[in-house]
Amino acid sequence: MNYKETLYFVATCLTISLENKNKVAIEKQLKTTTIDWDAVVKISTGHFVFPALYCNLKRAGFLHYLPQDLVGYMEHITGLNRDRNQQIITQAKELNTLLLAHQITPIFLKGTANLLAGLYTDIAERMVGDIDFIFSKEAYPKAIKVLRENGYLEVGEYKYYVPALRHYRRLKKEGAIAAVEIHKELLIEKFSDEFNYHFVAKDSQVLNGVSVL
């Protein structure tokens, strides 16, 4: 399997819970083709879909086609990611409560928003780095102040800060599982007049008191 074939195999595996024709095709490939599992692990890890790959293969009942040691490794990594994501959900809810108490409404973005929205059959499917949320330009400096006053400090040392950046420098609290990125924009300044906080706020959902996009 070359890179393109491996990438296509991984991508197709991610659809087998939804597309029966793809499920049939992948099972046939697993039965008749020698899969370069080292390449599959490398590519799926590089694209942050390794746990999702495992979850889809497990739901399809295809794990018996895989080497046993690989299945054990996938189970281990997926379990770690599930635990991490549960902690991220807890941290995000705590942040939401803190900010709402100061009359600041965050809109959670990206992976954290998807976890909070319950989009996944198994929360382990999504790999999340930071907790991202966006604020209005008016609330943005206040949100930074509140988080800093509650133990969120810069990750690493910064020699300077560029105000034009879409988000504030990464902050993390000791003992917290994830760093946070406080956004004031979604896109670079050139496009921010068309696609910004006020544009997306009207389409955000409020789920159990948490605003997500």
Image: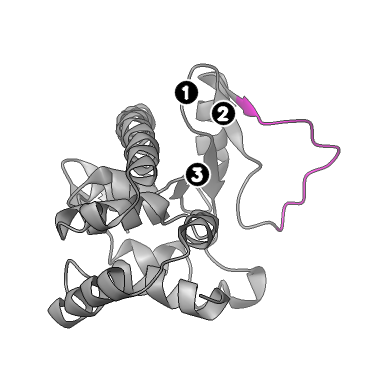
Look at the picture and state if 201 lies above or below 73.
below
Marking on residue 168: none
Q: Which residue is mark 3?
A: 129
Q: Which residue is mark 2?
A: 172
- Cα gap from disc 1 to disc 2, whole angstroms: 7 Å
Horizontal relation, residue 162 to residue 171: left or right: right
Viewer-proximal residue, 26 or 201?
26
Which amino acid is tagged 1?
Answer: Ala
For the C terminus, the quadrant is bottom left
Q: Which residue occupies 53% across, 45% down?
A: 182
Instruction: Mark 3 or mark 1: name the one nearer the start of the chain.
Output: 3
User: Where residue 86 appears, x then y in whole percent?
Assistant: 30, 32
Mark 2 element type: strand
User: Where residue 191 appears, x then y in whole percent?
Assistant: 59, 77
**Magenta stretch?**
153-164
Q: Are the residues flagged by discs 1 and 2 in contact, CB closer than 8 Å?
A: yes
Instruction: Mark 3 or mark 2: name the one nearer the start of the chain.
Output: 3
Q: How dense is the environment of label 2, judged by Cα within 10 Å: few (below 14), some, or many (20 and up)?
A: many
Q: Which residue occupies 46% across, 50% down?
A: 135
Which amino acid is tagged 3?
Answer: Gly
Q: Which residue is mark 1?
A: 176
Which amino acid is tagged 2?
Answer: Lys
User: Where residue 207 appears, x then y in whole percent?
Assistant: 18, 48
Q: Which residue occupies 52% across, 63% down?
A: 186
Q: Which residue occupies 31% across, 52% down?
A: 54
- Cα gap from disc 3 to disc 2, whole angstroms: 12 Å
